[in-house]
């Protein structure tokens, strides 16, 4: 639970190392040669901060930074706060607490009063609705699901909820995914005392049930993984996919039992009751291992960068699946101490959605600074943006974006773009010693109005013990007509897919 009264230990995966031949593959480094296309920063404004949620009645860290862009608004949904901004960065209405958000959406005070954590939100252009999720923090907790009444979040929300029945587990760190057929919630699960990781869960809810005048979870299918049979991996999620015309999807995650591996598990018939799983496939990846704590100008490693999970959304665009996570190249074998030497870097990967083959993967690093908390998004033209944090002994914690373009089937990242710099040299969360909580995730997405406009929301520090959030639009240049044609053909082919800290 993301409060100063946090639970005793943060689970960090410590899995057996399983290096494969892919570990010797050459990385596609950040400044690899690429097309000469520049980008511009559009709207760039401050979102909610700890000061704002203090005024709303909460005192929480970290914010669990999440938000989404819709046709006319950017909605920020974080621990303790919900805010709707106009596209120019001005508030469309006064921010409210997450507690008030759920009460207004019809959730009972009995559930809300259990405490709330781990916000997630998506805008779905297929249905022109917003979907939101958050968990309660009772020992056997509840997942809350919100659905906007229209494409305008100001028109109000309806809600439903569910518990993983027949189990005594706490569903932590929810992931929220959307595709043409369903909405998916994944979780890392702990015992009711919050002291031991016991497995993961993935729930599939038919979208038609959630879009009813009174949303329900009718037809929900829940798949439970125990630590003795970790077939779904760690922090499972189904790639968010705003395409249509396909019949199945898959659960994608890092392995729960070994480094340098991912788990891919097909999930079938998710548009109605009776969804099923097919056999899981293990694939090798070249780069994996936990990141180290991030450094600040005082030289100490004291910012918690989490671990090698895919903390942000994994996206499918046409026939490709895109993901990004953090790790330290100097300790690739995994299991390193959080203060080990080296620099935390961003690992990105592109998978073939049909065969699960790794099409390409690589690193974003400058070899000097720590990079962490990435979130990725891509358009049908093969343009990719990864938002993340970056810091070092000569750099305050900053919000950055890496911009990549696909040419001839090869993705190359050509720029790191500074979006915002924290106002203070050395941030602490105000209640812990080392490490200081950060994240626990960020969000990057493609604008539904313009495929060459990307938005990202990242955490920054606005005071010595005060976190803030930064919302940025990054506008990519429209490529030459021949390149656009290739991208549109690819799209056509695709159409024919408050972690509880214990």
Image (cartoon, grey):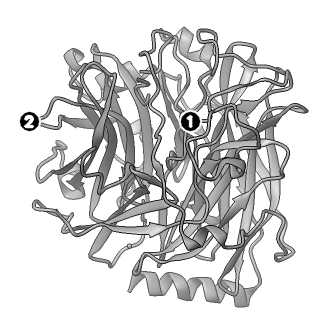
Which residue does the image show at 64% across and 16% down from the upper left?
429
In the image, residue 422 above or below residue 264: above
Query: In screen coordinates, is 105 left or right of 493?
Result: left
Q: Quadrant of the C terminus?
A: top left
279 with respect to 458 (left or right): left
- Which residue appears at 66% of the width and 37% of the height? 292
* Residue 438 percent coordinates (x, y): 61, 28
Residue nearer the viewer, 89 or 116: 116
Numbered tag placed on residue 306 in the rendering: 1
Position of the N terminus, as image quadrant, is top left
Position of 363 relative to 212 (above/below): below
* Callout 2: SS: loop
Q: CA distance from mark 2 to mark 1?
A: 30 Å
Between disc 2 and disc 1, whose residue precedes?
2
Where does residue 436 sit, x and y in percent of width and height?
A: 63, 21
Residue 122 position (above or below residue 96): below
Percent position of residue 193, x then y:
27, 18
Specify whether 264 is left or right of 487: left
Residue 445 in view in this figure = no
Outermost residue toward the right in this view: 394
Report the residue at 20% width, 15% height from top: 110
Q: Is residue 463 depicted above or below 318 in this figure?
A: above
The residue singled out by tag 2 in the image is 166
In the picture, measured across the screen, residue 383 lies left or right of residue 148, that is: right
């Amino acid at each position: 639970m993301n409060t100063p009264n946090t639970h005793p230990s943060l689970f960090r995966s410590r899995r057996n190392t399983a290096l494969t031949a892919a570990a010797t593959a050459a990385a596609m480094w950040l400044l690899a040669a690429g097309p000469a296309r520049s980008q511009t920063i559009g709207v760039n404004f401050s979102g909610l901060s700890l000061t704002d949620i203090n005024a709303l009645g909460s005192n929480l860290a970290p914010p669990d930074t999440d938000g989404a862009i819709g046709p006319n608004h950017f909605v920020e949904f974080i621990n303790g706060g919900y805010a709707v901004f106009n596209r120019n960065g001005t508030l469309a209405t006064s921010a409210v607490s997450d507690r008030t958000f759920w009460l207004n959406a019809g959730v009972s005070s009995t559930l809300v009063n259990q405490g709330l954590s781990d916000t997630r939100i998506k805008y779905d252009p297929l249905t022109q609705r917003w979907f939101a999720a958050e968990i309660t923090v009772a020992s056997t907790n509840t997942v809350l699901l919100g659905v906007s009444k229209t494409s305008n979040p100001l028109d109000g929300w309806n809600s439903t909820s569910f518990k993983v029945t027949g189990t005594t587990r706490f569903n932590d760190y929810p992931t929220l995914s959307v595709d043409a057929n369903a909405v998916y919630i994944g979780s890392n699960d702990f015992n009711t005392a919050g002291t031991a990781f016991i497995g993961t869960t993935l729930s599939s809810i038919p979208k038609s049930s959630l879009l009813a005048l009174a949303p329900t979870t009718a037809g929900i299918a829940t798949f439970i993984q125990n630590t003795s049979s970790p077939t779904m991996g760690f922090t499972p999620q189904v790639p968010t996919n705003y395409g249509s015309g396909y019949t199945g999807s898959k659960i994608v995650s890092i392995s729960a039992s070994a480094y340098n591996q991912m788990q891919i598990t097909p999930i079938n018939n998710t548009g109605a009751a009776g969804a099923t799983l097919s056999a899981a496939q293990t694939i090798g990846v070249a780069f994996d291992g936990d990141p180290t704590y991030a450094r600040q100008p005082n030289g100490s490693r004291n910012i918690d960068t989490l671990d090698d999970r895919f903390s942000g959304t994994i996206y499918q665009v046409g026939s490709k699946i895109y993901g990004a996570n953090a790790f330290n190249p100097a300790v690739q074998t995994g299991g390193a101490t959080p203060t080990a030497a080296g620099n935390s870097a961003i690992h990105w990967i592109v998978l073939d959605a049909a065969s699960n083959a790794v099409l390409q993967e690589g690193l974003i690093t400058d070899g000097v600074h720590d990079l962490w908390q990435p979130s990725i998004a891509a358009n049908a033209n093969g343009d990719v943006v990864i938002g993340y944090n970056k810091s070092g002994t000569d750099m305050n914690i900053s919000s950055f974006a890496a911009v990549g373009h696909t040419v001839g089937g090869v993705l190359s990242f050509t720029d790191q773009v500074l979006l915002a710099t924290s106002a203070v040299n050395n941030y602490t969360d105000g209640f812990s010693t080392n490490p200081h909580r950060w994240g626990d995730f960020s969000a990057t997405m493609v604008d539904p109005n313009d495929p060459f406009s990307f938005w990202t929301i990242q955490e920054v520090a606005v005071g010595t013990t005060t976190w803030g959030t930064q919302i940025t639009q990054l506008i990519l240049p429209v490529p030459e007509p021949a390149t656009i044609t290739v991208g549109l053909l690819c799209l056509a082919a695709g159409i024919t897919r408050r972690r509880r800290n214990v």
